[in-house]
Amino acid sequence: ENVLTQSPGTLSLSPGERATLSCRASQSVSSNYLAWYQQKPGQAPRLLIYGASSRATGIPDRFSGSGSGTDFTLTISRLEPEDFAVYYCHKYGNSPGTFGQGTQLEIK
Amino acid sequence: QVQLVETGGGVVQPGRSLRLSCAASGFTFSSHGMHWVRQSPGKGLEWVAVIGGNERTQYYADSVKGRFTMSRDNAKNTLDLQMNSLRTEDTAVYYCAREGNWGEWYFDLWGRGTLVTVSS
């Protein structure tokens, strides 16, 4: 099983700052099949990024994804108040995937 | 409106059964693989099962194989998950989710989820 480890567990920042979230896989992710989701309390996850760097429909361009192989990054260029949430990475393919344990992005 | 709405959750005793449903609207349901994903405090997000648009392809997580069965009705735009022999570790919020791209199991649309609690 390809284990995804996200860091940090909690990130405390202020609106307007830049956020950098990391996702490391225990094995190389083929075809860069890596997605990122945002989840707010009481809500379902929302797709932000797929294919490591492609933004989903309707996602603001302050969200960007990068990386390849085993190391991936989600960057939020300038935090808005609505961006404070939990973020999950997800390794997928045409077989069962795995999720990271999440990074809690909280207001400082 | 493009959406998925799950129903059927509740409290059930270990060993009993429960059937979840998911109603889809606003998109061509039969063109998409559909999945169930669950989320529990202890295990985080966990993929459960998939059914292809043509209904013939189905895969299940090892943790539910032989106990859970997925089905769909493309005429009614509905998805079901029959859960038998439930265990306490099946307690979770269950989401139905739409496959983002054929053969790529990321999820571009999620329902709001339905809570299943397995407890005596």
Image (cartoon, rainbow, N blue to C red):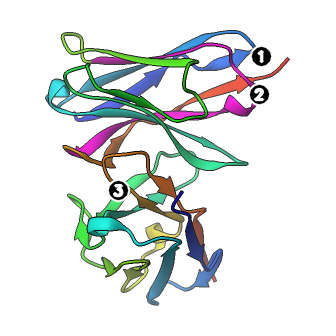
The tag on residue A67 is none
Callout 2: helix, strand or loop?
Answer: helix
| Residue under the image location 44 percent in, 89 percent down | A18
Q: Which residue is mark 1?
A: B14
Residue beneath the point at 53% across and 20% down: B68
Is residue B55 in the magenta section? no
Task: Identify the amino acid type marked 2.
Answer: Thr
Q: Which residue is mark 2?
A: B88
A87 vs B85: above or below: below
Please identify the dominant SS of the magenta region: strand
User: Where's residue A59, x and y in %?
Assistant: 26, 64
Q: Which residues are magenta?
A: B78-101
Q: Quadrant of residue A49?
A: bottom left
Q: Are marks 1 and 3 on the same chain?
A: no
Q: Is residue B26 left or right of residue A62?
A: left
Q: State which chain disc 2 sits on.
A: B
Residue B91: horizontal and vertical position, in percent? 69, 31
Disc 1 versus disc 3: distance between alpha carbons?
33 Å
Mark 1 vs mark 3, foreground winner is: 1
Amino acid at circle 3: Leu
- The kind of secondary structure element at disc 3 is strand
Q: Position of residue B100 (x, y in %)?
A: 25, 47
Q: Are marks 2 and 1 in contact (CB under 8 Å)?
A: yes
